[in-house]
Image (cartoon, rainbow, N blue to C red):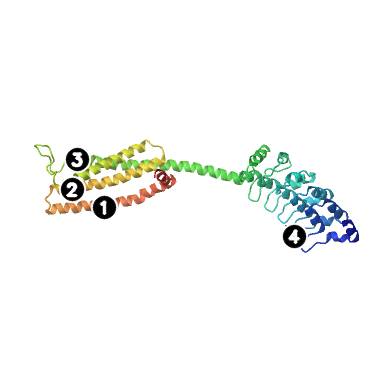
Amino acid sequence: MVEDILEWKPDLTKEVDENGWSPLHCAAYSGYVSIVAQLLDKSDKSVVYLRVKNYGNKTALHIAATRGRKRTAKLLVSRYPDCCEQVDINGNNVLHLIMMQRRFFKRLINIPWMNVGALINEKNVEGQTPLHLLADSQLRFRSDYIRNKKVDKMALTDQNLTALDVISSAEDLNGRKGGIIQSLKQSKARVGPLLWQKTMRKGKNSSKKVHDKGSDISFLRKVSDSHLLVATLVATVSFAAGFTLPGGYNDSDGMAILSKKAAFQAFVVSDSMALGLSVTAVLCHFCTALSEKGLQLAVLLKFAYLLTKLGVGAMVVAFLTGLYAVLPHHSGIAIITVIICVCCLVLNYALLGEYEKNVEARLYMLESKLDLGKFFRIRT
C-alpha cells in the first residue's frame, strides 16, 4: 500500500503534519524498516535531514537512535552516511543520543558508521563528548570503546571536566562505576584541571588545618602556664594562712582562741575552699602537661580556670573574715577593712570579666573547632 501511495504522489515524503513529523520520522519512530526503505527509495536526500522542531529538532536518525531501532538506524546510515553529523537542539549527534539510552546502547554502538572519529569526539552545547555521557549514564559499556585510540579521554566540558572527573564525582547507579573508572585509567585517562585544583586546594586546607591545630595547642599551653602561676600562688597563701590562724592558739590545749566566733569560722571555711579549689586547679594544669590532644586541653583548661577564679574569690573572703575576726566589730577600722575588701573583690571579678572577653572568646572559638559541645553531649 505504501508503495502504491508513493507511486501516486511521491511528494508526500516531504509533507509534515501539524507537529512537524514527516512519514520518515513516524516510520523511524516505530521501527518499520521496510517502510523506511520505500520512503528512501521514492524521495530525495533532503528527506533524511528534515527535523521535528517539537521533538528537540531531531532528524529521523536521531529518532531511531533514541528509540533503539538498530535496523532502521543502520539503514539510514548506510544510505546517507553524512546524516550522522547532524545534531539536535542540544548539539547532540547520534552517538551522544546512543550514550543516553541504557536499553539500546549495546545494539546501536556496533553500527560501524557510529564509530567515525568526528562523531566520537564531537561536543554538544555543554561541551560534552559521547564519552562524557557514557561516564554520566554508567552504561553497560564495551571496554574496547573506551580503549579506542580515536576517543579523546582528556576532552573537557564547559566546566573543565574530563570523563574521569564526571564518573568519579557521580553516584554508583548500577555497580558499574568501578569498572568504568578502571577502564578509563587503563586507557590513560586523567582528571581535569578543575578536579586537580580542588584536590590541591583540599591539600592546602589540610596543611593549614594542621598548622592551625598546632598553633591552637600552643596557645592553650601558654594560657595554662599563666593560670598555673595564679593557682599556685592562691594555694600557697591559703596553705600558709591555715597555719597562722587569726588570734593565735591557746597555750593550754593548742586550740584556736577565736574558734567560737562566727567570723573566724567563716575564715576557716573560706580559706579551706580557696586551698581546695586552687590545689584542684593545679592538678588540672598538671594533667594538661601530659595531654597532646587539643580537646582534652580545652576541657581541662576551662575547668581549671573556673576553679582558679572561685579560689581567688574564696581567698579574698578568707582575708576579709580573718581581719574582721580580730578587730573590734564596732570600730571604724573594721568597717573600712570590710569596704576595702569588698571593693577589691568586685574589682577582681571585673578584671576577670575583661580577661574573659579576650581569652575566653579565643577559648570558645577553639572549642567549636575541637567540637567541644559534642564532647560534653557524649558524657551527658
| Crowd band around label 4 with a 10 angstrom C-alpha radius: few (<14), some (14–19), many (20+) | some
Secondary structure of the residue carrying tag 4 is: helix
Give the CA distance from mark 3 to mark 2. 13 Å
Answer with left or right where residue 342 lies relative to residue 247. right
- Across and down, in percent, residue 51 comes to 77, 58
Q: Which residue is mark 3?
A: 242
Q: Amino acid at mark 3?
A: Gly
Secondary structure of the residue carrying tag 1 is: helix
Does the rendering let one see residue 189? no
Give the CA distance from mark 4 to mark 3. 98 Å
Q: Which residue is mark 1?
A: 347
Sooner in the amino-acid sequence: mark 1 or mark 2: 2
Of the pair 269 and 355, the residue shown nearer to us: 269
- Across and down, in percent, residue 123 comes to 71, 50
Give the CA distance from mark 1 to mark 2. 18 Å
User: For the point 85% across and 51% down, which residue is it?
Assistant: 34
Q: Amino acid at mark 2?
A: Thr
Image height of 149 relative to 361, above or below: above
